[in-house]
Amino acid sequence: MSGPLAGREVLLVVGGGIAAYKSVTLARELLRAGAKVETILTDAAQKFVGGVTFAGLTGRAARNELWDASYSGELHVELASRASIIVVAPATADLMARAANGIANDLATATLLCAKSSIVYAPAMHPRMWEHPATRENVARLVARGARLVGPVIGPLASGEVGVGRMEEPEVIARRVVELASSARDLEGVRVLVTAGPTHEAIDPVRFIGNRSSGKMGLAIADAAVERGATVTVVHGPITARASHHESITRVAVRSALEMQAEVAARSEDSDVIVMAAAVADYRPDVVATHKIKKGQDRLVLELVKNPDILAGLGAWRGANKRPVLVGFAVETGDLVGYARSKLSRKGCDMVVANLAEHGFEGDDNTVTIVTRETAEEISRRPKREIADRILDAARTFLDSSQSRG
Ligand SMILES: Cc1cc2nc3c(=O)[nH]c(=O)nc-3n(C[C@H](O)[C@H](O)[C@H](O)COP(=O)(O)O)c2cc1C
């Protein structure tokens, strides 16, 4: 699905107010913008609208139950981790009071308390509820903690009165979500170098040794970084994935590991963050035949020599100064965290994004573990574009600490 929210996971929390019927339209608007929408209905919301309507629209069951027996994990933690933006609409006085006070006694509020992403509240209530000092205080506390408000607006209310308390129109709320999704420009002025795709190691003029890397993960990181304000260069091997839609990304096409090494080396000095997402061949044919090798003998022996380890080279080059921030990738078939930690120290990088071979290649989704010296954050299956944001979030923390040191 294309659109400004393509690939984004949006969690819609519906509270128990008359305006809940408008949240059906809001769900549709978010879907139209390309988002994948998950819905939580509070108990009170279910008195106004049915979960079946949201399930039919979004293709995902509407959630209500904190104690969901059909779910083996902690649903509130999973929903909060998956969401890249949360919209509470209608945000009732009660929901905001509970959220402001850290109460987590149902699925909606437990999820809000676990949230790492931006939260947009679209309040709807009677003007006297809205103007009550308790609501004013609760709203102020939510906003002070970084929540965004859309509305309420003046207009005719369900009670027939006119006043401030009407939920903002779904189209306007959806537009605000889109704005928010594209406004996180926290990498402004940061120079990011990304490698992507496979390398092709020539055997003769028409044959090569390659691998199944599609380049999608690296391109997703480049897209995410540029959307967050970074200046981005991608050094990529022969990729089949679509070209990035951001014209401002500098693209440098290479074929072999040696070419990739040269292009990365030429740019490493001018980079603040280097993400080595390319699947660089470990070996290359020692001799490249100048003419096409003819079919002849039954056995053909190719002698391979080791390619330079670009990541380890960068790790050694930057040494103790820890600049640029260095992110490596590891594809393994087991013990992800163990191998990633050893790669981290052998190659002198800040973090390693590890994934299982069966998950990472070719598809649009991935399941990864982001491993640093101290932490290992597992990110369950989701679009590469979202994983890209999580990788950049983690890289940014190293950037912040190296900036404060230097
Ligand atoms: C007919 C009716 C309409 C209501 N409309 C609203 C409303 O628009 N805004 C609001 O904050 N509460 C409204 N309430 C009260 C909430 O439903 C009530 O506070 C409930 O506990 C909210 O639960 P929730 O925040 O978990 O969704 C309404 C109640 C009823 C019976």
Image (cartoon, grey):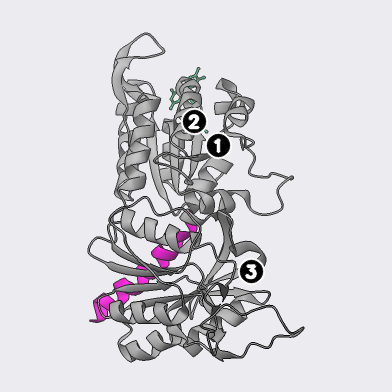
Q: Residue 65 at what x, y percent from top left? A: 65, 40
For badge 1, the amino acid type reads Thr
Indicate which disc, 1 or 3, sits on the residue closer to the N terminus: 1
Residue 356 circle label = 3
Q: Are marks 1 and 2 in contact (CB under 8 Å)?
A: yes
Dominant SS of magenta comes to helix
Asked if residue 14 shows in the view, the reply is yes
Q: Is residue 131 left or right of residue 195?
A: left
Q: 389 or 214, which lies in front? A: 214
Indicate which disc, 1 or 2, sits on the residue closer to the N terminus: 2
Which residue is located at x 48 percent, y 77 percent?
372
Rounded to the nearest whole Å, what is the CA distance between mark 1 and mark 2?
A: 8 Å
For badge 2, the amino acid type reads Ala
Rounded to the nearest whole Å, what is the CA distance between mark 1 and mark 3?
A: 30 Å
* Most distant residue in the top direction: 160
Element assignment for label 3: strand
Q: Is residue 398 left or right of residue 212?
A: left
**Magenta stretch contains residue 396:** yes
The mark lying in front, picked from 1 and 2, is 2
Q: Quadrant of residue 162?
A: top left
Rounded to the nearest whole Å, what is the CA distance between mark 2 and mark 3?
A: 34 Å
Q: 371 or 31, which lies in front? A: 31
Element assignment for label 2: helix
Q: Is residue 10 left or right of residue 188?
A: right
Residue 39 circle label = 1
Residue of label 2: 27
